Image (tube, rainbow, N blue to C red):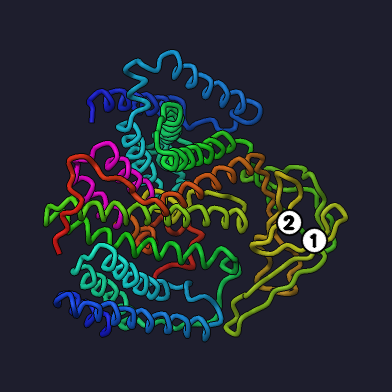
Amino acid sequence: MKFKVFTYIGAYIIVSAIIQLTSGGFPMHALAFPVNIAAAMVWTGILYLLHHKRGDTEWMKVLAGGDCSILALVLFIVGCLVLGFVPQQSTDTYSLWSRLGVFHFTTSWIFIAILLLLMTNLTLVVLRHRSTDKWCQYRFLLNHIGLWLVLFALFFGAPDTHKYRIMAYKNIPERMGYDVDAQPALLDFGLTLRSFHVDYYRNGTPSSYKAEVMVNHSPATIEVNTPYTVSWKEKIYLVGYDVESGNQSPYCIFESVVQPWNYLILLGIVGMALGALLLFIHGSNKHRAGEEVNDVVE
Amino acid sequence: MLLSAVGAALAWRPRSKRCWSTVLTLGAIAVLVSFVGALWFSLQRPPLRTMGETRLWYSLFSIIVGLIIYRHWHFRWILSFTTVLSAVFCIINIIHPELHDRSMMPALQSAWFVPHVAVYMLAYAIMGCAVITAVASLIKQQTALLHTTDNLIYIGVALITFGILSGAVWAKQAWGDYWSWDPKETWAAITWAIYMIYIHIRQTHASWHKTACLLVIIGFLGLQMCWYGFSYLSTSQQSVHSYSQIQ
């Protein structure tokens, strides 16, 4: 692995750490629509132009190379290890670790830089890819573009994703929801809880529960794994009830999830699933020069 | 286990007697499939909820994958290792018996439950076999073994990808998010990325045999963290996957 790859990417991560230390976490809300669309277009446009105009320069080759892919994946693992080992949402705000964003790592500049590096490498790898084998070409493109779409939509779509908790009492129309910061917001729909039913196993644990509701004067049933679709970008989920009261629960807790980038993520998932299918069917599918493949010794 | 052990032992015999190793291993698979089927029928739910139940699937899939490798690549030693691997998990289940009940929390009652967990257990079994071939490759210094590892990893990665994607779609249906950096999801991403590095290293640095083998072992450790290890960490308190905690 070339030393230059380490140098460039090491410097890039250090810069992201300095930004994190000096300005705090990544301002995700500032990237809400339409800024995220503009940022996404500028970013992909720059990469496309750089690929065509400066594709032969050393640092572009580094960015689009296999070594960069490996290093980006290693950094991604390091970032995930922070999330895997360090409990998030700590109230500690003064330590160096806290200032580096390890307790809110998904919105840390360091983690954002890692994701951006991974996406940049993916973009350039796709743009540079050439293959003579048709199936290898399909497999490569489906896997890489699928992953790119998922990362792209999750990354740029995150600021447009909103969740509102709704506490609905029986037969009282509710139009207010509360976001993650407990700030009230007027909903796009009116929700009225008509009835609630819970079934139990013999040991007393709930086997299923469902709520009969009216959404904008339309009757609907909402239960776990069966949300109600309000529109192409919004669904309502049943998340809780008064466990003590059971069937007599006077209220239910619902959650409205607004995710306009939903279908782009789904498209990426379908692409990755098809790519994985080709990976399953064709396997490693290669015999390297200089390596003897028939030297099986039982 | 007895059938599987005798089958593994017969694999070392002369070629004329080797068909019995396949027959006996198939018998062991039939016994385990019958046991899982009977458990499924008696519980009236898929036996995939508790750690013990998933260990049972792992034992079954390990023997199946071992037999496929044995038949396809003719590695006589693989059946011995997969039998030991399978026996370890069966013995753990015997030493730590669980009280099986029919209850299944509402969030698990989804069409995604069986494919999501089953595909993961099959991937775990394949990656377990990949560790065996990778370690054998390190010891014997044979590139053919690493080619077998390649094939196992590609199939295993495809299954892990299906597992992650089905989990994401299910999570969207149940909780509203495809991905929420839940500790179990995070460990799944770590494991997937480790195997991605393996694939990229095999593509771009074919001579890095030791690194590749080491990655297979590290990836398998990641799978253990994703399966049950994460529940020992303090971060697991934030996990919505509490139903799969150690029992």
**Which stretch appears magenta?**
B192-220
Q: Residue furthest left?
A: B140
Q: In this view of the protein, which residue sits in the foreground, A73 or B5?
A: B5
Give the percent coordinates (x, y) of residue A151.
50, 38
Q: Secondary structure at mark 1?
A: strand
Residue A1: quadrant of the picture: top left
- Residue beneath label 1, please? A220
Q: Residue furthest front?
A: B16
Numbered circles on residues, count: 2
> Tag 1 or tag 2, which sits nearer the N-term?
1
Q: Chain of mark 2?
A: A
Q: Is residue A230 above or below residue B112?
A: above
Cα gap from disc 2 to disc 1, whole angstroms: 7 Å
Q: Is residue B209 magenta?
A: yes
Mark 2, other Cα within 10 Å: few <14 / some 14–19 / many ≥20: some
Residue B64: quadrant of the picture: bottom left
Q: Is residue A76 magenta?
A: no
- Residue beneath label 2, please? A228
- Amino acid type at mark 2: Tyr
Give the percent coordinates (x, y) of residue A140.
43, 39
Q: Is residue A83 above or below residue B53?
A: above
